[in-house]
Amino acid sequence: MNWEEYFHIDRYTEEDGTHIFDVTLDPACDVYRGHFPGKPISPGVCNIGLILRCAEKVTGSHLRFTSIKQCRLTGLVTPSDTPHLTVEIQTNRTDGGTTSLRAVIRDSEKSYMDLKGELEDAD
Amino acid sequence: MTSFSEKSMPERIDINDLIPQREPVQMIDTLYEATTEEAHTGLSVSRDNIFYEGDRLSEMGLIENMAQSAAATAGVKNHLLGIPPSLGYIGEIKKCIFHSFPTDGEHLHTYVRYVSEAAGVILYDIESRTDRASCAECRMKVFIDE
Amino acid sequence: MNKQELSAKINEVLAEEFEVDIETITPEADIKKTLDLDSLSLVDLVALIEDTFDVKIDGQDVSKIQSFDSLYDFVLGKINA
């Protein structure tokens, strides 16, 4: 999947160990042809991918998930109603070479995703 | 892992009758078995798949395959009532572990088992594997937009 | 299994699954408040009880139960049914 078609990062800041990405979703992304025809809703997995791509900006390496302990989808994301989102990420490097991750996707109104997982270098 | 025979399915059901996802994000292409309690779905993994990254299907591809398999299981109920497929949303993914990633040309088999239901939320245990190895397992909560 | 054994077992598995201090689980306490349950996590409670005691329970019935004491009685009734 071409993630640059799905979103772009408007701003990246860091505050007290939390990495904050302001992103905008692109309604022209190909996924919306099938999710769902005539009713574009951002797939939950694409927002998991959004978190992963932002986490790569934090660590500066190519990452993949080894596990997702919990991922709650708490609100419907659509490129028309909720195009501007904030991704907040906290990472913690473990001794085993993996990175534990806690991430939230939200806007000023509500939160849409809350994820706890483990990552490793993909290369 | 148990393999279900195609004969055990009560009738042929079109995947499009069970889930609303369409190309390019339809992540199951075969339905071997689907009852209200369990399902067995298939996907031929190709490098043309939208969730194929580098030399493998990505974590996102595996999760979407498991999610659509769970939603199909939830959709069977509507199908048996003769009404169109409902939009089944994933509310939560838990204890998801990735073991390996399928590659171009491999066939992915995904097994869904009903666990419990409460407050309009259905809990499923799911495992996804190729002939070669287990790929991923997780527990998913699906809620139906009536 | 008597009620005392059953309540100890329920408290133990709930405290672990929902990551709460077992001391906060008292017979009169409100289940949803104590375990921080919402509409998404109620099914975890149902699955946990079913798995622990090998019984089938109706989510609808469980959603009406307020106190842990009522939950113990409910599960005891299912086991002895």
Image (cartoon, coloured by chain):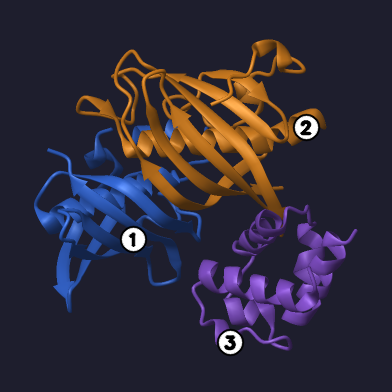
Q: Quadrant of residue A102?
A: bottom left
- Residue C72, visible in the rendered structure: yes
Chain B appears in which tint?
orange
User: Element type at marker 2?
Assistant: loop
Q: Is residue C78 above or below residue B55?
A: below
Residue C66 appearing in the image: no
Q: Colour of chain C?
A: purple
Do tag 2 and tag 3 residues touch (Cβ < 8 Å)?
Answer: no
The chain to which mark 3 is attached is C
On the same chain, marks 2 and 3? The answer is no
Residue A71 screen position, x and y as percent: 43, 56
Using the image, name the chain to which the residue with label 1 belongs.
Answer: A
- Crowding around mark 3 (Cα neighbors within 10 Å: few <14, some 14 to 19, many 20+) is few
Q: Is residue B30 left or right of residue B54?
A: right
Q: CA distance from mark 2 to mark 3?
A: 46 Å
Q: Position of residue A104 (x, y in %)?
A: 35, 64
Q: Residues within 10 Å of mark 1 (few under 14, many from 20)?
A: many
The disc labelled 2 sits on which kind of residue?
Ile
Q: Count the marks: how many?
A: 3
The numbered dot on residue A85 is: 1
Residues at marks 3 and 1, CA–CA distance in whole angstroms: 37 Å
Q: Colour of chain A?
A: blue
The amino acid marked with disc number 1 is Leu
The residue nearer to you, when weighing C81 against B118, is C81
Residue underneath mark 2: B83
Q: Which mark is residue C24?
A: 3
